[in-house]
Amino acid sequence: MITERFAGLRADLAFIAHWVTPGSRVLDLGCGDGAMMEYLQVDKGCTGYGVEIDDGRIPRCVRRSVSVIQQDMEGGLAMFADDAFDSVLCLSALQMMKNVEGVLRDIARVGREAIVSFPNFAHWPHRLALLSGRMPVSESLPYQWYDTPNLRCATIRDFSELADEVGLQVIECVALKDNGTPVAFLPHWRGSLAVFRLRKK
């Protein structure tokens, strides 16, 4: 499952790649430098777009031959029709949104399936930091409280409930350790990153 293309990249990418059907149409929200879309295009024959707001990352997407739209995804996805994509990806970006519910409703509208990942705030070192009176700083939350881009903190259970409210059914949920290893025992406590595969109800 893990290939050379994933070397040095985020731990969730290998799991996400095997959930995306070869040849499918994909929208990658908060696509960063386009690494994931490049992989899906080259190795799985997928087509689609990335959406990214960061000026510095757009040229890197272009160099990877990724069709990228520069836009704040909180501005809505009105340019895309209902069910325009087989799969919508939102990888380690949802926690940076002010209107998480609105973004999820847009994802549910334009995609038949969705894959979402985010740092699990209920990871045991985060709980321990809070008990000691400090905000958590970890590999999955690598910022101090005063300079973090993360606006929302969620747990696996929190996200499951919100997904249900916006009309998304959880197909699979994997909790990962920092090194990308899946957690089977006490995933809510021991997983630092949550990865959800969802579909419309």
Image (spheres, helix red, strand yellow):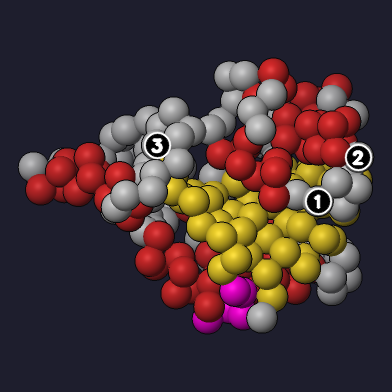
Q: Residue at x 32, y 33 (%)?
A: 138
Quadrant of residue 78 within the rendered picture:
bottom right
Q: For mark 2, what is the residue?
A: 45
Q: Residue at x 38, y 66 (%)?
A: 157
Q: Vertical placement of 143 versus 173: above or below?
A: above
Quadrant of residue 169 within the rendered picture:
bottom right
Q: Residue at x 40, y 60 (%)?
A: 156
Amino acid type shown at disc 1: Thr
Q: Residue at x 8, y 42 (%)?
A: 132
- The answer to whether residue 27 of the structure is visible from this angle is yes
Question: Which of the pair 130/189 is nearer the observer?
Answer: 189
Question: Which of the pair 63/160 is nearer the observer?
Answer: 160
The image position of residue 50, as x and y in percent, is 79, 44
Q: CA distance from mark 3 to mark 2?
A: 29 Å
**Residue, far left:** 132
Amino acid type shown at disc 3: Lys
Q: CA distance from mark 1 to mark 3?
A: 25 Å
Q: CA distance from mark 1 to mark 2?
A: 9 Å
Amino acid type shown at disc 2: Gly
Q: Vertical placement of 41 versus 122: above or below?
A: above
For mark 3, give the secondary structure: loop
Quadrant, the N terminus: top right
**Which label's residue is closer to the chain start, 1 or 3?**
1
For mark 2, give the secondary structure: loop
What residue range appears in magenta? 165-169
The image position of residue 41, as x and y in percent, is 87, 36
Q: For mark 3, what is the residue?
A: 177
Q: For mark 1, what is the residue?
A: 21
